[in-house]
Amino acid sequence: MTRLVDVPAQFDDRSFDQFAGAFAEAAKDGGRLLFDAHAAEWASPYGLVGLLVAGQAGRGGGGGGGAGGGDRPVINFFPHGRVPKLKAQDESDVLLPVTPVRAAEDVHAVVSKIQQRASAILASELGLDPKATMGFAMALSEACQNIVEHAGTGGWVAVQRYHWRQKLGRRVVVIAVADAGVGFRHSLEPTQSKRFGARWGDAAALEAALIQGVSRFRDPGRGQGLAGIRRYLARWDGKIAIRSGTARIAIVPKWDDDVPLKDGLPPFPGAQVLIIIPEPESTRK
Amino acid sequence: MIQHIDVHAVLQESVPGGGVYGDLVTRPTGRVVREQIERAIATAAVARVDFTGVGCIDYSCADEIVAKLLRERPAVLVLSGISDAHREAIEPVLAGHGLAALIEGPGGALETLGAPEAAAVLLEELVARRLAARTPGGTFALTLA
């Protein structure tokens, strides 16, 4: 039996849980999935990479996480021949199109490609300090490496610049990285679950990784990636949110009203990372 | 004598795609580059590790190359060709480990990067071993060529 999964009209991190809920419900039976995007008007980078993750997990390519899995022969996207635009109503620029990340070589390619475009846009258009552009490539590299090092499967990355006229009145750069891999809980379970005891779960795993900087590796140098991203974002007033399994954690800057930690969300495979770097208020045009 | 290591050349030679990409990113890349450097400086007392031509260094490579070389201390390491972008990655990694590195500027002046306590100990040790000395300008420089 084919089950329909509706793609939200405005598909971004805010509407993602609605999509995840529909996906989890449809994936329960192990039948064929049809992703219906006829009502979708646009998708953010986060929405698009999330959709690819759903497709990968639905094919049985995911590493777990509560939803997906199974052995479905066919996944259909956009049956009406419409692909949601990778563009919000406000003006936007694609800095990096949706790009697969499977191995270290892919991260090299992403960093190389983004540096050519990002430095010009971040410094001249977003008015960021040149030092912010240096850290941008580092943050992007570390976010992509989480897939290579921990997911156990491939994933995707996309980077886009927006002018958030209504929401923020400023320009922002959005990085979205997603995979259908094992997720944070599974990755950290062997080393962290005892420490957390009954609290152990997706939310505790995210807290351990993002707030405490722990890694599944015992090497004391590991865990630098997310810690480095956090430092970078703290310096440039940016935001990071990570969704994995049934939980989502965020470092929320003053300009945003997101919730720091949500648990009990609809299960979704792997991990989805959202990074937002805003134009400094002082350079707003 | 100081052993000179051209990190960009090591990257180009030792990593698949290194001939195309000039960035030190990802753990596997860092590991391969560090192992090459370790072999090259195995018998050296002092090694100048030159990052000229290297684009981006991420935190993973800063840890995998610089922090691990400093922890294992196969030789006295002096980093050169370090840009502001490189510092952005290396400094917090070293500070997190309580490590310090020597940076050699274009004029030969030495400065330290990383944890202040470790930096003070490092400079003292170099001076005591006569590998570095205070210059008339008040900075430190290597005594070896």
Image: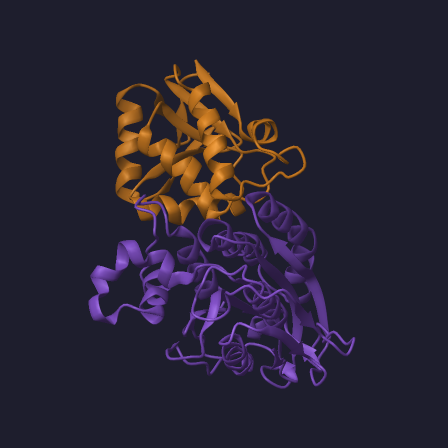
Chain colours: A purple, B orange
**Which residue occupies the foreground of this view, B144 or A248?**
A248
Q: Is residue A153 visible?
A: yes
B101 with respect to A232 (left or right): left
Placement of the N terminus of chain B among the 4 image quadrants: top left
Q: Is residue A89 visible?
A: no
Image coordinates for residue A51, horizontal then vertical, percent: 61, 70
**Which residue occupies the foreground of this view, A163 or A30?**
A30
Whether residue A33 is situated above or below residue B51 in the rendered picture: below
Image-quadrant location for residue A97? bottom right
Whether residue B86 is situated above or below residue A160 in the rendered picture: above
Query: Of all residues shown, which one is farthest toward the front?
Result: A1
Q: Residue at x 57, y 53 (%)?
A: A137
Image coordinates for residue A100, horizontal then vertical, percent: 63, 55
Image-quadrant location for residue A98? bottom right
Whether residue A55 is situated above or below residue A145 in the rendered picture: below
Image coordinates for residue B116, horizontal then vertical, percent: 30, 44
Q: Residue at x 33, y 27 (%)?
A: B73
**Which residue occupies the foreground of this view, A88 or A56?**
A56
A198 with respect to A157 (left or right): left
Image coordinates for residue B36, horizontal then vertical, percent: 48, 25
Q: Residue at x 34, y 38 (%)?
A: B100
